[in-house]
Amino acid sequence: KKEAPKGRAKAVDLVTGKTVVEYFFDPTLVIDDANKSKKGQNPNDILLNSKHLFVPCKIIKSLKEDGTSNNGSNNSNTGNNKKKNKGKKKRQSMEDASDVNSGPALVKTADGTLYKVKAVHQMAALTAPDDYIGMKDVLHLANVSEASLLHTLRVRYKRDDIYTSAGPILISINPYKLIKKFDGESLYSDDIMMSYRSGDTFTDEEPHLFQAADRAYTHLMDSVHIVPHLEDDDHDVMVDGDAPLGQAPGEPRNQSIIISGESGAGKTEATKYIMKYLARITKKKDVHEGLRSPDGKIASSLEDRVLSSNPLLESFGNAQTLRNDNSSRFGKFIHINFSTDSGAIVGARISNYLLEKTRITTQIDGERNYHIFYQLLAGAGAETLEKLGMDGGASTFRYLGSKTVEKSEKDASDFAETLDCLARIGLATGDQQTVFALAAAVLHLGNVTFEQDEEHVAKVCEDTLPSLQKACELMGLEQEAVTEAILTKNLSINGKTIKKPSTVAMAEDKRDAFAKMTYSCIFLWLVKSINQTLTVAAKNNGETKVGFIGVLDIYGFETFEVNGYEQLLINYCNEKLQRHFNRHLFEVEQNLYSSEGVDWTYITFNDNRPCLELIEGGSGTVGILNTLDDSYAGMGTSAEKDVKFVNQLHKLFGSGTGTKKKDGHKYFVTPKFGNDRQFIIVHYAGEVRYTVDGFVERNMESLTNELKDLGASSTVELAKSVFSCATSDQEVTQKNDTRRSSIRGFSVASQFKLSLQALVEDLERTQPHYIRCIKPNLRKAPNSFAAGDILKQLRYSGMMEAIRIRREGYALREDHQSFYNRFSVLLGPAEIEGEAGIEQLVNVLSKRLNVTDADWQIGHSKIFLRHDLSDKLERLAALRVHTAARTISRFGKFVLHRRLSKLLVAWARFRLVMLKKYKRVRAATKIASFHRSRMEVQRYRADRKSVITVQSLQRRRVAIQRARKIRDPYCDMTYQDIKDLLETEKPKLDEAVNAKDFKKAAKLEAKIDEINKALDEREPMTRKKLEGLIEKCQSSLDDALKRKSYTEAGPLQEELDALIAQRKDLPTQEELKEAVKTAEANLAEAVKNRDFAGAASSQTALDEAKAKYAIAKEAEGADDEGGEAEAEEEKQGVAIDGIESRADLEKEIGKMQADVDDAIAKKDFKGASALQASLDERLKLRVFFPSVEELEEQVSETKKKMDQCISNKDFTGAETLHADLEKIEKLLEAEKAKEAEKPAVATPSSFSVTLIDGETKEFDSRHDLEEAIKETKTKQNDAVAAKEFKKAEAIQTLIESMEKLRTNLPTIDDLKNDIKKKQAEMKKAVEEKRFSDAEALDKEITELETKLSKEKEKAPEPVAPEVLASKSPNVSSGPSLKSAPTVGNRSQTTKPRMSATLVGGAKVPKTPPRGSLVVTAKTPSGRKDASDDVSDTVSVKSFKSRASKVSKGPAKTPSKKLDTMAESRPVSKLRPKKPLISSTDDSVLAITQMLASKRGDASLIVSNEGGLAGIITDTDITRRLVAKNLNAASTSASAVMTPNPTCVSTTDSAIDAMSTMV
């Protein structure tokens, strides 16, 4: 400490009149009893922990005569000695006041606290008024010391002056509150911004962030346009050899603003305000054309987008920590490009550094995850949160600590600002939702947990599968792929890939790594998107020059109780920036003095270069980061590699525990305890103890290739772009450093080291401007000035050395020629004569200003000046220029007066000429104005007349409407409005009658009559009404004709014709429905034929038809049937193509199948193909309409799952399943109701046909139907024999109608099969305890048994002919045509035969039970097709006609002999063709070629075992191959054939064979 200088300024106490001298209180000099307990404590700790550190204090009295020693021990004196010495001390203090200022004394601070100090002379005194007022620039203090600097900051902080200058360095103290000026204006208002934008270098404005930003902007612009003046920065310093720091002459000199400080010191806020200032002072109207966003909309201006980037990156990159509520967990360097011609912003670019990924998965108590998660929960709508799966709140996410976080208004407002910023940078709404979805997916990934199976392999827990599913859904990834990538690892060995299962710990690490990668990709993509929107292609035509101002906002120095890998990299970054600060303020300064030959005493400063070499390596030594990279190699777990790493550090840099290595690195300390897991680095800001848990793993990022490649498979295009940022960023970094091993990979530390080195290189090429942010206290409390913490930060930042070198050194420097050109104006004419130069100028000015060589020195190329002298020279030069300007001004005024006199004479002459011209112009103007006035009057009169006419017409129209309203009160109401009014008045009439208010009832009744009358008059013309009018007119016409009143008949006939003509304009609803169906068919046909022009016209016709139908329906009203149908449709709910249940679907499928068979029978293969395609579409609909059995199975499965959930106490899942069960049961009941309605509609008790004579005949059994058919065929034969062909044709139509009734009247065998089927269903229902269904089935069985008994009574069992029985004892012959009860059904009593001979001699080992040759295939519904019935009937008729031709002579009717011969004739006598045989493996193409070459109609298909597998015909090929567009060459016969065909024997009767075919 320096002693107080003599002759210091003294103050006088107004009360006592004594001289008062104040000192800066030094806690290390305290000698009171409280200090005894601190004996042996570090004096620096005592200094920094005192709350009165360097506060002004007053001396109360001297303690010399109290026996107080300098070392703090007091001598014990008796009370008598004190009384004797009391008077002596008092007299001596009054006599010699100067003795009080030395030795021990009792001092008092401003708050009244008393201290005993060892020596007053060791405390610095307040020597000037500047020490009390708080100077805005500490370089102007009379005595700069730690005490005066700290006290100046304290004084300014108390009056809310948070910014203080230290020459070119700005000191900023975080106030932790909003500061306003005396007039209530914000410290950062628009007016304050513009007040700092001035060209006055010597402004008296208070220090501010805006001042630093303006200085950087001004230097950038002046580097191109203005010759530089005396500058207080070192932009001209030589850094590397002879290369200048700036650009070439005339080129822009880029600037940088470096904001540094601890976490919570306000760096992020300072960055915001600097960017706002630069955007505000450069923003001009219509300077930039608005860019377009990705969705085509006009985006915000470039300045707004630059400002929007900062809060957007804060949302995704900042978080709440113990020290700061908005701590930047990444670093950014913002390049803001300016046009040096216009001065406007022309683009920007952001570089980011080291996003803290660990915070995504874990946070310590009292800290939060990144802001965006909490903003989403607080600001997003309920629909968005439900869509993202975040409606459960923060407590449902493990990555958010599973803690309940209340929604804050700040988070909600920040989310709104985030949305606004996303929109400003041109991000579309859909892309914004995708970004939020990816962020939500990160949280859902954190909820996924794992467990071990029996083989100790990890698997996803069942209760967390929904979280994994939701995460995959939001990211657009397949759940199976993500699960496999997390639970397995691909190992490549000898070219083969082996999947290795993961343990639970490995799976959790992969899950967290995937979540970190996803969030990091989001952040990198945002930075990339921001840079794309901020990049403007400058129109560089060779004249426009662009420079930039870089704003660096990076994490501050951090030290916690437990410091990890991220803290090491963050503190390494701060060491690098501190090195840059030292280099520019100390080393470069002193190197410049040496190179210029200036006499200079070197200043010592805290050089942190050895600490940097310890961390990153250098000077032939291996650094900590290199050792960390090398520790990844080898086998072992992550924990073992961490131990290996820390042991290697202690081996390389440390020796004893708790001390710095004597023969090694002085900045490395081995801790006394925990040295197997910890090490200490002595940073410029103090010692930091690091714990190496997870260092090696975090350094190498153990992401597998499977997880990295997942993003490329995303179904969301934007997600693909986001995930691609991970690989692209790593590829760029690896390209910049080829020294890394491809096997080991590229570490995070190496990436960070390269990016940090690039940052420092960028800063070295710029002119730096420093802002030191200071945190006033650790509690983040406003109005709290912790002097010890602030002094520690000032020391760490090197502020005292910087102030001292600026103050004691030559702060300003300039080239010789530039200095001479600017200040030679101070020389007189006599002083310029002779040899003029820089030395003569310095000598003259030194004598004139009475300064010595210590105030300035001449270097080899520059002149160096102190700050005070430069101010004097600037003011003298300004005064000399001002004097010269006044002289020039006087001369200019003289010249001006002479010129003005001449101009005055010329003006007088000109005035006279103009007066004459003015009179002429005035007269012409009067005439023109009168003419215009007259024209306007005429125009006004015409307009007035028109207005009156319009008004009269309008009044007439209103009067007409009023009269019409009087005549007809309902003239302005439509038919529907009057109808609604009638419905409203009727209840009122009933109420009046019930209330016996007959007067009111009478009025209402009269009103209702009027309404009915108006309703009748306005009833729209409909087809029904038209038909009524036609009928009425026809009746009148008939009556007139009957009365022979032809006079009346003529007009009535004309009226009737007119009404009939209206039928074209009013078609019926049936006609309109038919028109709609026709239009739909035309549209479908056009679409099928790909006739899109025709489809468009068909669609127009369909729309018109539907519109006409809707109008007719609305006019006529829905009839009862239509209303019931609509009600039923509404009741059933939504249908697919008009199908509402499985029963309806099966009914339509059966109908369509019949249509297909009918088309095939008619050889309409094109139509059959189209119908088959429609049938296939209907078959596909079975998936959407489950059957009763499927619904019952779903009910059973749902009940089991619900019971399982209840047993597992998963009541939420049980409740969901219960709701699903109710829905399924409702569907089941509806389907059963449809099934119950089906037989009632499909199977009436009897069926009837209309005979030729007009009578109706009913059939209630199959036997009666067959007898009637047989009799009718006999009549047909008689008619044919009598050549009554019209009658025969009518009989044939009757026969076809009766044959169609066969499908509705089952045979005995069909009834038996139905009974068996129903009995099986009833048994199953009883087993499943569905007793209501069993009861219904029992009723159906009873009805079927009644029908069976009735059918057996009418149709006894047939008896085979004796002749056939004798010839074939083992084969039952078929019944004759006359006695057979049905056509096409053989007796079922015949037992299956093991062997039979097919037609043509082919033998089959096993034949079906009915042993007949295949004729036709069964339909899916189990009945024969209608087309087959018709074709078979024709076959029987043709066979009989051929048999009748055998007898000679014309035959009127077939004889009994012929029938007997036909019945007894075997199949072998018909000479059937030899069958064509193929295998099931043959292709359809080969079989078709065989049939074409041999002219065959069908081919038998034999299985590989030799048995008959089926038959294939042209019908099978058409329906199952052509209709489905299958490839004949690749389709086998087994896929197309009709399986299990019915066969007959060669010994069977021909009539039986034909009956079987029918």
Image: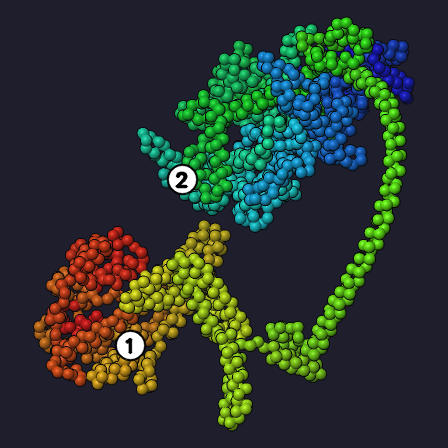
Where residue 1233 appears, as percent x and y from the top left, is: 42, 69
Identity, as a three-letter code, of the amino acid under mark 1: Glu
SS class, disc 1: helix
Q: Would residue 61 be found to the left or right of residue 1239 on screen?
A: right
Q: Position of residue 1412 (x, y in %)?
A: 18, 67
- Viewed as shown, does residue 84 lie left or right of 261? right
Q: Residue at x 78, y 6 (%)?
A: 833
Please give the residue where the numbered disc 1 appears in the rendered image: 1296
Which image quadrant is residue 244 in?
A: top right
- How many circles with numbers are drawn on the protein? 2
Q: Which residue is mark 2?
A: 484
Extreme-left residue of the structure: 1367
Q: Position of residue 1099 (x, y in %)?
A: 46, 62
Q: Could you tell me which quadrant the N terminus lies in?
A: top right
Q: Amino acid at mark 2?
A: Glu
- Residue at the image position 82 percent from the left and 18 percent from the top: 884
Q: Quadrant of residue 292?
A: top right
